[in-house]
Amino acid sequence: MLVRELLERVKFSIRGRRQARVLLFSLVVILLFSAWGCGRGNPGEKTTASRLLMDTHVDLTLYGVDKKTSQQITKEVFAEMMRLENILSRTEAGSDLNSVNRAAGSDWVEVGPELYLVLGKALEFAELAEGAFDPTVAPLLELWGFGTEHPKRPSEDELQAVLPLIDYRLVRLDRDRSAVFLPQEGMKLDLGAIAKGFIIDQGLEKIRKLSSGAVLINAGGDIRLSGKKPSGEKWSVGIEDPLTKDRNSGEPCLAVLHLEGELGVATSGDYQRYFKEGGELYHHILDPESGMPAGGLRSVTIVAKDALTADALSTAVFVLGKERGLSLLEQLPGIEGVLVDEEGEVIYSSGLEGKIELMR
Ligand code: ADP
Ligand code: MG
């Protein structure tokens, strides 16, 4: 039912090709879930709801709650997610993040606890990934025009002019005042690689005040899993093939993860948001060192204890590339990853042995 509804939306989407791509991606994730058993169970033991948020489709599946409770939870959770999106969005005119960006080079800005927390985490991941992950990447994103109708490849001179502004080490935080300062004019923060994870984690927090049943939140492939399904089945998460041209072709996925416990799973891929120019494909995950889309990998899926960590690290490992990315993962306890390289080869961290099923 959900699948048919999504198909209709894809067909009649009036928000353009990018929207259709996002919806198609959500559709593929949902197809994978149904194909590989995620969320299967007796009718009545789970309820599902869906909402367009954070530029993607957010699907919420609740186990073991009655319809009325589920409606109440759904309403509250989506409202909370929307509230957080409005705080953490770079493009939302009145957001905390936007205020910090507008005051770059001139003023400290006092911000709410949510932005302070997420920015602090983003800076920690930037440190961990030695700058491959960098929340000050926004001027580059704007130069490329990602998120606009007319993205374009910038010239080398344009890139060189903007690169000095991309440096997470310049961001100043004042814990006592919960304030943030960007010391150079033109600096801008973007939390697109971490906010979605944080927001779905917060969605789960909200649910936990009202239900102790199993929960699956899927925001266009960024996933939060919690609790045990009444059937006792593990969660199955399909990893799609980034090389498959036609994403709606029903092609089998590359691998399936069989997971249990409290988990966040997130994927960064070059096929999620991109444009083509002169026969070249340019995607939205940028290497802060060169200013160019990061090369080497087609997708990275991270499994961690929470979605914020999975989200941030999927982007970080994507930029770090195969060797450095895998070596970082092997150093981090409780965090695993599946990398797909340009040849379509699947490489995974050692902790996934026994939990990953390769499909070809
Ligand atoms: P998605 O948004 O498709 O889930 P990601 O989690 O990988 O994918 O986030 C990509 C987004 O992160 C980009 O759209 C942009 O907003 C931001 N971004 C791009 N490159 C970087 C980077 N090197 N470090 C931090 N954020 C980045
Ligand atoms: Mg990410």
Image (cartoon, rainbow, N blue to C red):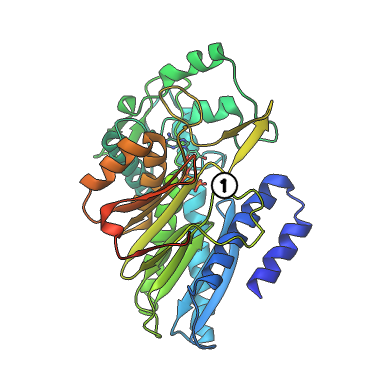
Q: Residue at x 36, y 45 (%)?
A: 313
Q: Is residue 75 visible?
A: no
Residue that carries the numbered disc 1 in the rendered image: 243
Q: Nearer the viewer, residue 165 or 346?
A: 346
> What element does badge 1 sit on?
loop
- Judged left or right of residue 45, residue 56 is right
**Label 1 within 8 A of ligand 1 by Cβ:** no
Q: Quadrant of residue 356?
A: bottom left
- Judged left or right of residue 324, residue 359 is right
Mark 1 packing: few (<14 Cα in 10 Å), some, or many (20+)? Answer: some
Image coordinates of residue 24 in percent, x first then y, are 65, 56
Image coordinates of residue 347 in percent, x first then y, are 37, 48
Q: Residue furthest front?
A: 360
In the depicted structure, whether residue 40 falls above or below residue 11: below
In the depicted structure, whether residue 293 falls above or below residue 57: above
Q: Quadrant of residue 29?
A: bottom right
Image coordinates of residue 209 in percent, x first then y, are 36, 74
Q: Residue at x 54, y 88 (%)?
A: 43
